[in-house]
Every structure is written in structure tokens, then in C-alpha cells.
């Protein structure tokens, strides 16, 4: 069982400032209709965890309908939209370096065209990294599994991005376990895709955070924060209580420079680069997924501003223009059973109003996707302790 908090929640005494709102719900601006893809995952074998920690979406079979892929009970399951018929494409997680199997399945995942054949493959993480090759007929043919790395251990986040600026996507993943469980403890790594990824050779890890990301670093994002044309990486750590970003050097295989944003945020998990006040400068938006609250760090001085100090355990975070008014809004969801799925309406200047999407829904992972292809953005949720997969239809007309 995953603990919902690494540290006791601290009382927050926060005074009103630009961007801060009292955590009071405002009119919802329409009802977000809930659609169930998978409901109430039943216990499997003895000791089998039932949380659903990660979900991704794509029209894999190119039939015009979005499909969904999720991981739970050690499996990876593909759901055929719009009727959501399930197909298990991986029945058992691979063994880790100590020959253990992660019974809960992947802790995070991403999609990436690993083999350059024009479709996106599945990358999964937990105590190791692996990828599943998308076949020509995703619901009929085998998804072949290949290993990426065994020492990037405890990966709570995998993202695809062009780190080295060669026009091809790379992989970024974190390794937060200690030296007793991995040779790459308290680190964040990036990987170039090998020339022939279908071979069984493991990928080479380049450490951008070399043992300087302690405290169980969680989720991260990439963007050019200092205008030098190179992508920088941000992350947060719940036990370490910090948010930070790493500046990419000219040679990305060399050591990256760490910049601390905060070291007094117990439960820190998610952080993303985003221009929230439309001033042309990238800010950071973050959440304390094993604590309380959503916050942001406005550029250029990155002084912390609370958005909502009371939302419990917001262990997922995404930015998108949900109301189609030209600025970035936020979406998040608690990871506890009595939590809330919410979105924050931005007035364009970095002042936010909270709207509840749903109550009693938990989540470790949340994605913004046009699920029904009606040209607005919906919210897809991996239900964690809710043991479900749902999506919420945007009421925007």
C-alpha cells in the first residue's frame, strides 16, 4: 500500500497575496459529466495491490476514437474506445534487479515513438524502466516488451522530450531510492534512444541530477527557463520538502546546475513550467501531493505564491486552456478517497478561482485529453485508491 503522506501535514499560516485565494469553491461553470472506463478493480492474487497509478490516451488503432492504457495489478491494459473493451497487453511486470515484481504495476507511464515507425509506444516505470512496442494492429497483435534500464529505481515520473536538441525525443526518468537499492540513488536521468532500440541492449543513463535530488523526488517537467535555448528540468520531493530546477549545460551529458526554489514544502510532488500570468516569462506551478496545497513561483524571482493552501493531497497536476479563453488553467485531484478533482480558472494574470469537478475521486495521475474529439479539453483520471479509471467531459460549449 502506498502511503498518502510521507510527513504529517503542517499547519499553514499564509497571508493573502497576489494569486492567493481562500480554498472556497465557486460556481462550477457547468457540470463535468463523469464517464467510467474501468470501475472498482477487484483484488487479484493474495497481496495484490489494486491502485491504478497511471493512465495515458491515444487513438492507437486510428479508428477515430480515443483509446486508453492503464496499469494495475502488475498488468498493462489497453481499453478500446468508445466502448472501453479491455485487452491485457502485458500480464506481469518484469522482475527488478533484486528479482522482485512490482505487484501494483507501473507507477507512471508515457507515450513515445521509440522505434521511429510513426506510432507511439508505451514506456512504463516502477522499480525499472521498460517499453512496449505498439504493433500495427494494437488490439490484435502482441506488444513486445523490452527493457530500458534496471538501476533507475523508484521512477515516479517518465516524460518524453528532446533534451539534447537533436530533433528526436529522449526519455527523462527519476531514481529516488537510496544506495541500498540502486547504484543511481537520489538522482534524475535522461536517455537517448539507441540506434536500434529493438535490440536487447539497455539504454545509457545520463545523470542530470547526480545524487543531489534526495527525499524521494517525484514528478518533473522540462522547459527552457533561462532563455539559452536548452531545456531545463524541474522536480519536487515530498520527504525532502523541496522544489528545484536543474539548468542544462551546453553538453547535456555533463553535470547540470541545481537551483533551489523552496525547501519548506513538506509533501512536494508535482511541478511544471508554465507562463501563468502571460508576461512572456516561464513560471513554475506546483502541488504538494503528499501534503496540502497548490502553489506557483512567478518569474523572474520565483517567490512562492499560494494558489490554494487547503486542497488535500493533490498528487496530480496539469496545465491547459480548459475554458478556451487564451490563458492556462490548472487541473488536479487528491489521491485520497475523500478527495476532490478540481480545476482552477485563471483570470489571465495569475489569479485563480477553484471549481470542483467531482468529489470522492482519488488520483495519482491526471491527463488533459480531448477524449470525445469535440474540440475542447477533457480530464482523464487514473483512480489510485478509488480503483477506477474515469474521464470528465468538459461542459464548455
Image (cartoon, helix red, strand yellow):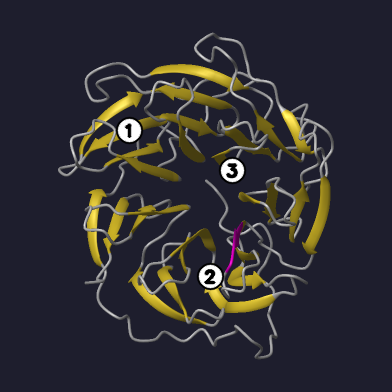
In percent of width and height, residue 25 lies at 42, 84
What residue is shown with label 1?
77
Which mark is on residue 365?
Answer: none
Of the residues under marks 2 and 3, which one precedes in the sequence? 3
Q: Residue at x 71, y 64 (%)?
A: 266
Relative to residue 168, is residue 377 drawn left or right? left
**What range is drawn magenta here?**
271-275
Q: Secondary structure at mark 1?
A: strand
Which mark is on residue 312?
Answer: 2
Of the residues under marks 2 and 1, which one precedes in the sequence? 1
Which mark is on residue 156?
Answer: 3
In percent of width and height, residue 197 lies at 53, 15
Q: Secondary structure at mark 2?
A: strand
Q: Quadrant of the C terminus?
A: bottom left
Q: Eyeballing the image, is 137 above or below 51?
A: above
Spatial distance from mark 2 to mark 1, Cα to Cα? 29 Å
Near-viewer residue (287 or 283): 283
Foreground: disc 2 or disc 1: 1
Query: Would residue 320 be counted in the magenta stretch?
Result: no
User: Callout 1: 10 Å neighbours few (<14), some, many (20+)?
Assistant: some
Amino acid at each position: 500500500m502506498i502511503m498518502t503522506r510521507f510527513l504529517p501535514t503542517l499547519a499553514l499560516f499564509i497571508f493573502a497575496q497576489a494569486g492567493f485565494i481562500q480554498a472556497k469553491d465557486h460556481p462550477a461553470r457547468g457540470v463535468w459529466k463523469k464517464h467510467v472506463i474501468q470501475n472498482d478493480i477487484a483484488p487479484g492474487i493474495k497481496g495484490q495491490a489494486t491502485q491504478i497509478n497511471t493512465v495515458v490516451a491515444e487513438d492507437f488503432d486510428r479508428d477515430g476514437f480515443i483509446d486508453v492504457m492503464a496499469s494495475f495489478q502488475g498488468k498493462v491494459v489497453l481499453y478500446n474506445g468508445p466502448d472501453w473493451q479491455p485487452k491485457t497487453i502485458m500480464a506481469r511486470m518484469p522482475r527488478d534487479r533484486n528479482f522482485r515484481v512490482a505487484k501494483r504495476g507501473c507507477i507512471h507511464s508515457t507515450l513515445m515513438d521509440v522505434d521511429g515507425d510513426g506510432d507511439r509506444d508505451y514506456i512504463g516505470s516502477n522499480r525499472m524502466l521498460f517499453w512496449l512496442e505498439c504493433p500495427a494492429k494494437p488490439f490484435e497483435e502482441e506488444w513486445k516488451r523490452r527493457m530500458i534500464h534496471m538501476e533507475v529505481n523508484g521512477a515516479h515520473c517518465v516524460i518524453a522530450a528532446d533534451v539534447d536538441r537533436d530533433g528526436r525525443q529522449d526519455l527523462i526518468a527519476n531514481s529516488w531510492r537510496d544506495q541500498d537499492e540502486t547504484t543511481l540513488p537520489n538522482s534524475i536521468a535522461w536517455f537517448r534512444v539507441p540506434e536500434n532500440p529493438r535490440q536487447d541492449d539497455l539504454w545509457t543513463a545520463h545523470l542530470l541530477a547526480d545524487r543531489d535530488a534526495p527525499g524521494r523526488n517525484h514528478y518533473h517537467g522540462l522547459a527552457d527557463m533561462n532563455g539559452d535555448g536548452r531545456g531545463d528540468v524541474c522536480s519536487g520531493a515530498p520527504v525532502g520538502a523541496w522544489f528545484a530546477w536543474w539548468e542544462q549545460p551546453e553538453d547535456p551529458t555533463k553535470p547540470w546546475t541545481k537551483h533551489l526554489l523552496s525547501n519548506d514544502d513538506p509533501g512536494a510532488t508535482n511541478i511544471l513550467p508554465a507562463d501563468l500570468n502571460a508576461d512572456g516569462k516561464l513560471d513554475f506551478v506546483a502541488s504538494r501531493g503528499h501534503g496540502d496545497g497548490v502553489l506557483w513561483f512567478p518569474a523572474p524571482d520565483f517567490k512562492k505564491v499560494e494558489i490554494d493552501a487547503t486542497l488535500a493531497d493533490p498528487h496530480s497536476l496539469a496545465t491547459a486552456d480548459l475554458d478556451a479563453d487564451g490563458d492556462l488553467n490548472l487541473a488536479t485531484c487528491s489521491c485520497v478517497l475523500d478527495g476532490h478533482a478540481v480545476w482552477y480558472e485563471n483570470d489571465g494574470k495569475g489569479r485563480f478561482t477553484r471549481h470542483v469537478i467531482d468529489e470522492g475521486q482519488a488520483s495519482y495521475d491526471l491527463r488533459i485529453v480531448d477524449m470525445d474529439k469535440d474540440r475542447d479539453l477533457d480530464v482523464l483520471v487514473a483512480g489510485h485508491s478509488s480503483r477506477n479509471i474515469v474521464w470528465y467531459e468538459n461542459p464548455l460549449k
